[in-house]
Amino acid sequence: MFDTLPKTFDAVKSWTIAEIEPYYQVLLNCEIGPDNIEQWLTDWTALENIIGEIFSRARVATTQDTADNAAEARLKHLLATVYPKVTQAANEMNKKLLQSGLTPDGLELPLKKMRTEVALFREANIPLSTKEQELGLEYAKITGAQTVQWQGEEVTLLQLNKALQDRDRPVREQAWRLMMGRWLQDRTAINTIWSQLFHNRAEMARNAGFDNYRDFRWQQFHRYDYTPQDCETFHHAIETVVIPAVRKRNERRRERLGLERLRPWDLAVDPEGREIIRPYETIDEFAAKAEAIFNHVDPQLGAYYAIMRQEDLLDLPNRKGKSPGAYCTGYPLTQRPFVFMNAVGTREDVRTLLHEIGHAFHNFETLAQLPYRQQRDYPIEYAEVASMAMELLAAPYLNHANGGYFTDQEAARDRIEHLEKILFFWPYMAVVDSFQHWAYGGGDAAADPAACDQKWAELWDRFMVAADYTGLEDIKMTGWHRKQHIYRYPFYYVEYGLAQLGAVQVWANARHDQAEAVKAYRRGLALGGTKNLHELYAATGVKFAFDAETMAHATKLIEQTIDQLEAQLA
């Protein structure tokens, strides 16, 4: 029966649960043992590949055009009719494999994850999970529709971001206030979505026997290698090590701009008053230059990226109605990744593309090395190493001499900005992660959006030392509205901070031996989800860490490199 499974998305894109269920029945009715376990797992993977691609493409369509009612209806139909059935079937499949007592090679850790999933499974949570995804769609629809009038044109907020680099301070302020004012127009609508999400998630946790959503989500994410207390240790390391470095960088910025105090609209402009760097003119140029860069990093990685260009697996430009942000997802039946972003012609676009293609490389490597879907379920804490390390591994090749985006001087400026943003990101990550620990760690205080405003403002004042928000209190306290992870991917954020620390260690290794660092990087990616976090990081030549000492080494390297680059530009 499985020999006749379709091999292309076109052949399955209209499938309903009626086409899917018979295959699950065959798998569930099959007696499995040592002689046929590999074939059974292969068949299960083939079916899951089809289901995964159907849902992945449906979700992509809703982000490519948030005003596409047909795409939204398609996804909601799948969530209502297919998602509940396949969720139940997946739980039965997990139980069947666990009850067999078999432990195929490379499935030791995946089996542990299955035990967790079986223990967490509650049929009552299926409609709640569907509702959560639908509320996430509503959030995306609101934010995707945000535009303003700027200099006689309707522009998205991402397009308006470019004005924050303008050397004319009144222009920057006007653009920033316009952008934030547009967010405030949606304050009530976003608060309504949040309140529904909060209660929905609390109910899911209670159904599974947990006192709070944080503990439930911890198990959902298979966080076996660290605890909430480790996150607090990480926040403290950032507070004691990184924030002093950030203060120093911002004081330099203030002095160079000749300002009495930095305001939020002063953080993106070049502090030396130099011309804005425009790394590319067209999207085609943007995509082509990246291919030259990846070929320098590693020929096989360059070949992976070439496939994505040739097969139209990149949606790069920003446009009205497109969901904000960037992501990489997988099309498991097609055996390809897909990258989505919002390029508007800035240097940040370059880093975003490098980042998301790092995820794509992870996808390619696991597909090439691991036969079963369960082995490819790698942890997010390591997935973000794949992306963030690629930003740094590609950095030596961003200049024109290597087919990249910048002159040598522009490349130095870009590198300084990138390294500064790593320092600036860690405190922001601590705000987002601390906020979610507060919101979901117990009690119902966070059900009230006003309490969330107050907590966000408190955390902002603790960790974010860059700009003076006097007179801008409403904008400061509603910053949690502007972080989509809080709404769509709860508790997915500390991973970025942990992975950034890992990525800086990869970069430190590359400074001594770029080729060996890239080799170790690919070695780690190819392990997928077959090893724990400590083992994945170690395979990549780095340490999975939360402590102030490791953070201090990373911060010192960043600061020293910035000083060297600034000396070159002097």
Image (tube, helix red, strand yellow):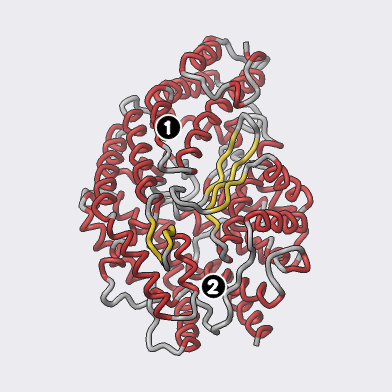
Vertical arrangement, residue 339 with respect to residue 244, above or below: above
Q: Quadrant of residue 272?
A: bottom right
- Quote the CA–CA distance across marks 1 and 2: 43 Å
Q: Secondary structure at mark 1?
A: helix
Residue that badge 1 annotates: 70
Quadrant of the frame with the C terminus: bottom right
Amino acid type, callout 1: Ala
Q: Nearer the viewer, residue 348 or 85?
A: 348
Looking at the image, the residue that sits furthest to the front is: 152
Residue that badge 2 annotates: 420
Q: Residue at x 59, y 31 (%)?
A: 373
Vertical arrangement, residue 245 with respect to residue 32, above or below: below
- The spot of residue 174 in percent (x, y) is 37, 73
- The spot of residue 217 in percent (x, y) is 38, 42
* Dot 1 or dot 2, earlier in sequence: 1
Residue 241 in sight from this viewpoint: no
Q: Nearer the viewer, residue 538 or 565?
A: 565
Using residue 3 as the reference point, say whether residue 93 is left or right of it.
Answer: left
Q: Residue at x 59, y 40 (%)?
A: 529
Quadrant of the frame with the N terminus: top right
Q: Residue at x 55, y 66 (%)?
A: 550
Amino acid type, callout 2: Glu
Q: Quadrant of residue 203?
A: top left
Q: Secondary structure at mark 2?
A: helix
Vertical arrangement, residue 268 with respect to residue 44, above or below: below
- The spot of residue 49 in percent (x, y) is 58, 28
Q: In the image, which disc is placed on residue 468?
A: none
